[in-house]
Amino acid sequence: MGSLFALRAICPTCFRGRGHDHLGDGVRGGEVAARLARARRRASAVTASVICPCVSCVLFASEVKTDETIIDFYPADSIPHPPQIFPRPVAGLLRPVVHAPTNRYNAKVRLGKGFTLDELKAAGVPVKLAPTIGIAVDHRRKNSCLESLQANAARLKAYKAKLIIFPKKSGKPKAGDSSAAALESAQQQRGDLMPVVKAAPKVEYVTVTGEMKAFNAYQKLRVEHMNKKQVGPRKKAAEEKAAAEKEKAK
């Protein structure tokens, strides 16, 4: 009995749906399955390397302990190659820390699309220079509070302190480029670029007193609501009373 093949993932280019034509080469899903079936029959029991009908995908099959060969699908250009993008970070551009939208999720923080113009100005980074040194810019986003502006400005300043800028032409540095010693010791940033650090919430414990137990929150809210509602009538009544007393004094 030959080796069994199991699909661990779906090719994002070829297997887009049942019976749908593949854009570009006109290969239908049934024909792709037939070609893969013929490739499975031809594959050896040890290791197989199969070429997908889509030229942008390569299928690798490797033997596992359970006598089951697993086929991995991934686009050929989806994995960045660190040597090709050196010295830029593998993770890409630096992005701000923003709060998620809606009242339900706004307490959570995540990476945003890009820094605002105010954040770049607060950190002293020119708008046109930012994309050239690995900083993402979002012209549409606006800062709704001072805390987010200061936090992202501090994030930019920390990034600038660690930044090493290579000259466009080797041996001809310009103003703003890093020193030769810094260039020699430069290492490519692997992994996440300044990931989001989520602080754990602190819980404070207090002793429950008799005054706290006797406090009626509902009654307090009703009183404050009525005080807010009666601001105008009470002010008018006070003015009328003062006018009446003034007329009486005459």
Image (cartoon, rainbow, N blue to C red):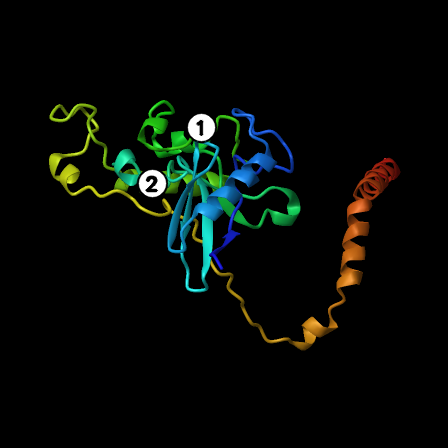
Residue 98 appearing in the image: no
Q: Position of residue 80 (x, y in %)?
A: 35, 38
Quadrant of res 247? top right
Distance of mark 2 from mark 1, alpha carbons? 25 Å
Task: State whether residue 203 is above or below residue 62.
Answer: below
SS at circle 2: loop
The foreground one among 60 and 123 is 60
Question: How many discs mark residues in the rendered view?
Answer: 2
The residue beneath circle 2 is 90
Can you say which quadrant of the picture contains the C terminus? top right
Between label 2 and label 1, give the one nearer the viewer: 2
The foreground one among 249 and 228 is 228
Q: Which circle marks residue 216 in the picture?
A: none
Q: Residue at x 33, y 40 (%)?
A: 90
- Mark 1 is surrounded, within 10 Å at the Cα level, by few (under 14), some (14 to 19) or many (20 or more) other residues, namely some
Quadrant of res 163? top left
- Decide if residue 224 is on the left or right side of residue 43: right
Q: Which residue type does callout 1 highlight? A: Leu
Q: Which residue type does callout 2 highlight? A: Val
Q: Position of residue 181 (x, y in %)?
A: 12, 39
Q: Position of residue 159 (x, y in %)?
A: 32, 40
The residue beneath circle 1 is 117
- Mark 2 is surrounded, within 10 Å at the Cα level, by few (under 14), some (14 to 19) or many (20 or more) other residues, namely some
